[in-house]
Amino acid sequence: MKYLTPILCILLTAVACEGASSATERFRQYFQLAGGRELTPESAREALLAKIPPGSSEQEVYEFLKKAGIGSDGLSSFYPADKDGVIVCRIEFDRKSPGVVKESYGVFFLLNEQRRLKDVKVEKWLTGP
Amino acid sequence: MVAPARPVPSSPAGPPAQGRSASRSASDRRGDIEVLPENEVFGRLACYRPAGAVDAPCIARPRSHRRDSHRGRRRFSGQTRGGRYSWARYYHPGLQRFIAEDPIGLVAGTNLYSYANNNPVNFTDPLGLCRIEARFSHLSLGYHHAFIVTTDPSGTQNYYRGGPTAQGPSGGSSGALSSASSGASSGSMTGRKSGSNSGNSSSPGSGPGGPGQNNGPWGQIGATYGPYTPRSVDWDPAARSMTVLDNNAACGPYDARFEQIMRDIQNASIPYNPLTTNSNAVAREALERAGLNPGRPPVWTPGWNTRLP
């Protein structure tokens, strides 16, 4: 009985998982991050800043995201800089991905007063029923 | 959102029941308030205006209603006689006040009986002001994740949600980011807050209390809240919604209440279970503790009926 819930959940979701990709896999694909290294918010930040260095213009950040395919597959999106100068990139969970609990990511591109990239922050989110 | 108590005649909902006097009914402009003949509710009562003049009809109650989950607006059924009603309070159009206490208690103000902040002229707003919704994100296989969104008159939105703090038995792959959060510390980019002083970030496979604590594969429930923007974890413009409250009060008191409830749930350190003590249970619990009727979700939300300890 103790294990019934996890087993049921695994079985229920396993049937619809084929061909699905987790948000983590897509995170790597979008930003072309190597699979060998474990991703942490800090390592993801470093990898992203290596590709879009600090000082890049706001427009360059948008181009970077478009080139990465963000917003083109229905499972990711980005929002222009808000009043705080933060460009929000969201990598959503795939409904077909395995697991009852879904993972998704928020990537935040912080702009300075000159509207140039200052820093990047990455957060992983968990969502369940 | 409630129009002032100025009943206008409308046609009766049906023929008068046998043995009753011929009934008249009236409703306000939106149909929120239905005025019933006095003997419909309390039998043949004398009805008095504030000045003491006998007048009828005098007692009104909201029509039984159902939610329009798509447009976020309330609709009202035609069933008005002896019918059920959800969060209804009896309203006295002559006194222009409710005759039962506000179910939310003192949260919405010190006057538990007031209507439209005692200023129905200035506060009439047929479009509704503070709106509280339960929203439902589709996760997989028809099951949904519920969270609460409040929208105040200025359009400012806040969310309240629960979630796991670990990814469960299928999570924890080597490729996953090692620091996940269902609710983040107050310093997060999302502006989220949780009730815990330490936040509830965690690593997959372990609960927020660390590996030494047995919180189950999904960790504990992380209850969080904050501004509802694209930065929010649950940002989903396509999410289905169910309007729980749409009234003329400011959202502030409700937001304060929800924040306290989230803190209480967070500090209760409740193990997360996808089928029982989960985010849906958090949403329902928060609505109930705020004195609102959680209603029945339009989608499958496992755990909705689970009460949290």
Image (cartoon, coloured by chain):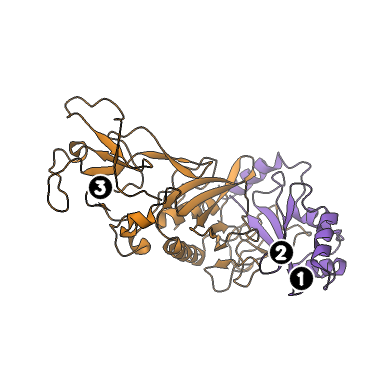
Chain colours: A purple, B orange
Toward the viewer: A88 or B93? B93
Q: Is residue B194 left or right of residue A41?
A: left
| Residue A83, percent from left and from top | 66, 67
- Residue at horizontal 84%, vertical 60%? A64
Residue under mark 2: which chain is it in? Answer: A
Residue under mark 1: which chain is it in? Answer: A
Toward the viewer: B283 or B99? B99
The image quadrant that residue B203 belongs to is bottom right
| Residue B235, percent from left and from top | 63, 54
Can I make out residue A38 in this image?
no
* Residue at image mark 2: A81
Give above or below for A53 relative to A17. below
Amino acid type of the residue tagged 2 in the rendering: Ala
The quarter of the picture where the C terminus of chain B appears is: bottom left
| Residue B237, percent from left and from top | 62, 49
Toward the viewer: A35 or B194? B194
* Residue at image mark 1: A115
Q: Marks 2 and 1: CB-CB under 8 Å?
A: yes
Tags 2 and 3 on a common chain: no
* Residue at image mark 3: B93
Distance in Å between CA atoms under marks 2 and 3: 50 Å
| Residue B137, percent from left and from top | 60, 48
**Furthest residue to the front?**
B121
- Residue at horizontal 21%, vertical 39%? B41
Question: How many residues crowd around disc 1 within 10 Å: few (fewer than 14), some, or many (20 or more)?
Answer: some
Question: How many residues crowd around disc 2 within 10 Å: few (fewer than 14), some, or many (20 or more)?
Answer: some
Can I make out residue B64 in this image?
yes
Distance in Å between CA atoms under marks 1 and 3: 57 Å
